[in-house]
Every structure is written in C-alpha cells, then in structure tokens.
Image: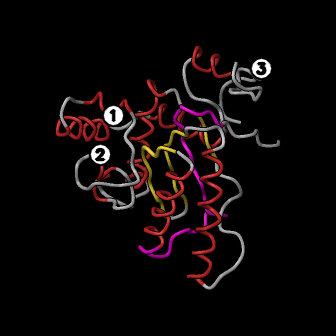
Amino acid sequence: MARLPRLNLPGLPHHIVQRGNNQQPVFASAADHAFLLALLFEQAKGFKVAVHAYVLMPNHFQLLATPDTVDGLPKMMQAVGRSYVRHFNDAQGRSGTLWEGRYRSTVLQPERHLLSCMALIDTAPVVAGLAAEPRDYPWSSHGHYIGLRNDRLVTPHALFWTLGNTPFAREAGYAELVHTGLGVVERQQLSDAVLRGWALGDAAFVADLQKKTERRLSKVAAGRPIGRK
C-alpha cells in the first residue's frame, strides 16, 4: 500500500524518525554525531524549525520539532539528509544510499503527548541497551533538560516551563518524569503514530486538524479498525 503524504502543519510539534537503510549504522565515530548535530542546528535555524528534543541512535535518529512554516521541516530534513550522506560516504570511502527512503513523522497534540514523546526519545538508548540511564548517553537532548550541559540545538517547548518555577525545579521535574517512564500502551501509541503517519491526539484535536488538510489523519477516518496490520 502506498505511503500517505507526510503531515506538515506549522505551529505543532512533529515527531520525526530517519532510519538507516536496512537498519545499517549511520554513525561510525563521534565526529559523525557532532557533524549531524551541527547540520541540524544550522538547518533548523535557517528553515525556522524549533528542535525540542533529539536522540542519535546507531542506526537512526529521532527529533521532536515544531516548524514555523508548512515547508520548513521537509526542507530542513532534505538539506540535513543530503549533506550528511555526502559527509558519511566521504569519511567511509563508500557510495550510494544511507537512509531508508524518506523520513517518518507525525503530528502530536502537545498537551497530551509532547512530554511523553520527549521521554520516549530520552529513554530510547536505555531500551536499546546502550546506556544504564538516559543521563549516561551523550547523543541526546536529555543532558540539556536536566542541567548537565547547555545544548545550542535545543529550544524548549512552552510546556517544559510548566514543570517548575525555577530552572532547578524544572530540571528535577523533568528528570522525575523521564525516570517514571512510559506505560507499554503509551509507548506503543507514540511509536505506531510516527511510523505509520497518523496524527496523535484526542478526537477533538484530530477533527480540528482534519479541517486543515485533505490527507487522512487516522485509521478511524478511513473506516478501518484501530490496531496492527
């Protein structure tokens, strides 16, 4: 079945996943990680995309970002993807594709899912067995949010500021939120939404979004049952 066109809705957070072709590694050194982060910073600034959270995993990377314009996110991802492939191929003496086609993405209702999506991103290295705790993994935005470092790529979403009245309170509140973790159902909802391209939010949120696009936003809208294929 043909994949649906991506949702690109300015002013709303998008969860994005770009995976390596056939699950191949997309990083071979710390320099590769640093190069991609520099690319993301440069292109996000140029295309007016606020990056709220990220994680660079061995065979993919994830972002949580809000674009200011309808074409800002796809243009940013295209520029980042092309430049990084050139860098990686030159460094490794290889040629050909690196990515698994186009990136996957979905739109989230921030009040219900933004902080949970951040926790999903932060805990990905732990789930994959790459770190004992999110704070131990160097290639994510988690360190920024718990006060370990200042990350120039990160622009906190307004909802982050509701976690406390002081920087220390927000850092502690966020650390506790991530430590509490996600339930199995919520983790699955977030993962399925980004991989399949369905908008994630309550019925009113999805119905309001549907007024702004002709593209189907959920399986329910297509008259199909909710669940796995």
| Residue type marked 1 | Phe
The alpha-carbon separation of the residues under discs 1 and 3 comes to 36 Å
Q: Around disc 2, counting alpha carbons within 10 Å, would you say few (fewer than 14), some (14 to 19), or many (20 or more)?
A: many
Label 3 residue SS: loop
**Among numbered discs 3 and 2, the one appearing first in the sequence:** 2
- Horizontal side, residue 209 vs residue 109: left or right: right
Q: Nearer the viewer, residue 206 or 229?
A: 206
Labelled pair 2, 1 in contact (Cβ < 8 Å): yes
**Among numbered discs 2 and 1, the one appearing first in the sequence:** 2
Quarter of image, res 77: bottom right
Residue that label 1 marks = 160
Q: Residue furthest top?
A: 204
- The residue at 44%/24% (across/down) is 111
Q: Is residue 101 visible?
A: yes
Q: Quadrant of the N terminus?
A: top right
Residue that label 3 marks = 223
- Looking at the image, residue 125 lies above or below residue 219: below
Q: Nearer the viewer, mark 3 or mark 2?
A: 2
